[in-house]
Amino acid sequence: MPKTRSADMQRAIDRCESCREVCLQAVAHCLQRGGSHAAPNHITTLLDCADMCGISANFMLRDSALHLRTCEACALVCDVCAKTCETFPDDEVMRRCGEECRRCADSCRAMVRSTVQNWLRTVNSTDNPQPEAEHGHTSSDRNDGLAEPGDAARASDRP
């Protein structure tokens, strides 16, 4: 049974798929227009963005453990693509592409943030179990010289 995706992840998947489609439409538009629209660097950036969005959506759809990394990269590529699209301010197709790239980048970043926050909550709740009440002692009452999980990390955080 597939696990339920967070709203942020589903939004990022939807945005990635939409951005991919808009970037591919922009490539066709730019090649038809010619001139600076068809500049190799511009077309390459649009194709990079379309590919990265597709890859990121696929990683999220299959619940890959590496989806955070692809989404971080996707946000970066979308930012770059938006900038190149914005160099054509009077072109409606390019304006729409730039806006879609910005929305996708924002959505990918939000998904990464929420996933990391959820993971940290899970880790913190399992690393800090409740004291055992049945013996009347907490783990901090121990004096056996054994470190608790995370003690080294907490000690290294102190000045």
Image (tube, helix red, strand yellow):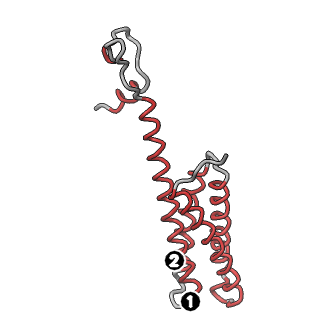
Q: Which residue is identified by label 2?
A: 99
**Left or right, residue 28 beside residue 129:** right
Q: Where is residue 157 in the image (x, y as percent from the top left)?
A: 34, 33
Answer above or below: position of 25 versus 66: below
In the foreground, 50 or 6: 6
In the foreground, 85 or 8: 8
Q: Where is residue 42 in the image (x, y as percent from the top left)?
A: 63, 77
Assess whether mark 1 and mark 2 are in contact (beta carbons under 8 angstroms): no
Answer above or below: position of 139 versus 159: above
Q: Which residue lies furthest to the top in this view?
A: 144
Q: Position of residue 61 (x, y in %)?
A: 65, 55
**Left or right, residue 133 beside residue 71:** left
Q: How many labels does the image show?
A: 2
Residue 150, numbered label: none
Q: For marks 2 and 1, give the CA distance.
A: 12 Å
Q: Which residue is identified by label 1?
A: 91
Answer above or below: position of 157 versus 62: above
Q: Is mark 1 on a helix, strand or loop?
A: loop
Q: Residue at x 57, y 72 (%)?
A: 81
Q: Which amino acid does label 1 sit on?
A: Asp
Q: Is mark 2 on a helix, strand or loop?
A: helix
Q: Position of residue 69 (x, y in %)?
A: 58, 51
* Of marks 2 and 1, the one in the foreground: 2
Q: Which residue is drawn at 64% across and 60% down?
A: 57
Q: What residue type is labelled 2?
A: Glu
